[in-house]
Amino acid sequence: MQTMQSRVVPLEEGKDPGVTGRTNQTKALPIRLLQLFVLFVLFCITFSVISILTIRHFGINGVMTTVTSSFQPCYEEPSGLDRWIKPPSNLQHTMTDKELLWRASLMPRIKKYPFERVPKIAFMFLTRGPLPLAPLWERFLKGHEGRYSIYVHSLPSFQPHFHTSSVFYGRHIPSQVSEWGRMSMCDAERRLLANALLDISNEWFILVSESCIPLYNFSVIYHYLMKSKYSFIGAFDDPGPFGRGRYNNNMAPEVNITQWRKGSQWFEVNRKLAISIVEDTTFYQKFEKFCRPACYVDEHYFPTMLTIQAGNSLANRSITWVDWSRGGPHPATFGRADITEEFFKRMLEGHRCTYNDRNSSICFLFGRKFAPSAMEPILHLAPKFLGF
């Protein structure tokens, strides 16, 4: 009876032996959750401290860069015209002559431009090295930005030292050695033309030397070229020993003796003729092989080729004045003692030529050859005689 009572009492009092175990487990669970929560809070505090220290040390940009540096966005090429019409900002490129001439020969077939284009004059200086008359050109070009470009071809070894404010700063193109009377001289001229053609706004291309000076102010020269129906390159038939006498029968059939022309290497051509020069391969090969001293190729290649291809576009005269009165293979050079008011009058006055098929007294826009010593007196007399 007592045994039965001992079994019953616990049941009556609701004291199930298994309940005590479950109660202990229930008490342990909140403790574990509390421990996990504490660990989480400690982790957050630690991460926050590390983040604050990182930002203080590297800055917020450094942190953001670290986070986003692995992202590689997909870029598209510009879809506008800028990359086609914007001139190169740096004239120093790595193109070979063949690559350069090919690139320069590209041209649009539609004549009307779909953007506002201000035609520019490309002044191409073919020099050995320094430009001693640069101050005169600086004065001549001042105030006419946007209407001209400058390109300089010198000996590869020459290192220019122009001030950053100079119009000549950064305007030297990749060059090679050129020799007077040989094809390398024409190569240099084609190199200048090709680099200038990369600027689609260049419309007129004038070859000058370090000894050349402008004979009028910029506005007069600009409008003279703009209104001209012709390009100015000497191309005449000389029957004597220094003309046809230099012709080689191997030039035929591309060039017959009746098509052989001679002229000064100092020229002005428009954009269409400039492209004809740089894209030529047929005539170039003939002149390279069969016009060597005493055939001076720089006097015959361009005049002959352009006469054959576009004779009606040529004025058949140069716009660069020179004085051959002293004789010899080269024109006269003028120094300080030569530069007088009488000299300027002789150089500028008394000329007769045709301009757009009409008689004109303005025949020459540039003059040569002037020594470095001539610069000071020219600068002094330029306002009175040259207009700048």
Image: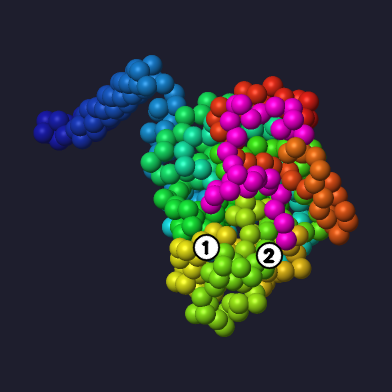
When the figure is inspected, residue 37 is found, relative to residue 248, above or below; the finding is above
Q: Quadrant of residue 312?
A: bottom right
Q: Residue at x 71, y 33 (%)?
A: 343
Q: Main secondary structure of the magenta part?
A: loop
Mark 2 residue element: loop
In terms of sequence position, does the residue under pointer 1 or pointer 2 come before the other?
Answer: 2
Q: Amino acid type of disc 1?
A: Val
Q: Who is closer to the viewer here, 299 or 76?
A: 299
Q: Residue 49's spot in the image, x, y percent? A: 34, 18
| Residue matched to label 1 | 297
Q: Is residue 293 left or right of residue 114?
A: left
Membership of 21 in magenta stretch: no
- Which residue range is magenta in the image? 316-345
Residue at the farthest bottom position: 253
Q: Amino acid type of disc 2?
A: Phe
Quadrant position of the C terminus in the picture: top right
Q: Residue at x 80, y 40 (%)?
A: 349
Q: Residue 287's spot in the image, x, y percent? A: 51, 69
- The structure's colour scheme is rainbow
Q: Is residue 92 visible?
A: no
Q: Residue at x 82, y 50 (%)?
A: 352
Task: Count neighbours of disc 1 (C-alpha within 10 A) and say few if under 14, some if 14 to 19, many if 20 or more.
Answer: many
Q: Residue at x 17, y 31 (%)?
A: 5
When the figure is inspected, residue 2 is found, relative to residue 326, above or below; the finding is above
Membership of 337 in magenta stretch: yes
Q: Residue 25's spot in the image, x, y percent? A: 24, 31
Q: CA distance from mark 1 to mark 2?
A: 15 Å
Q: Who is closer to the viewer here, 23 or 373?
A: 373
Q: Is residue 147 left or right of residue 330?
A: right
| Residue matched to label 2 | 236
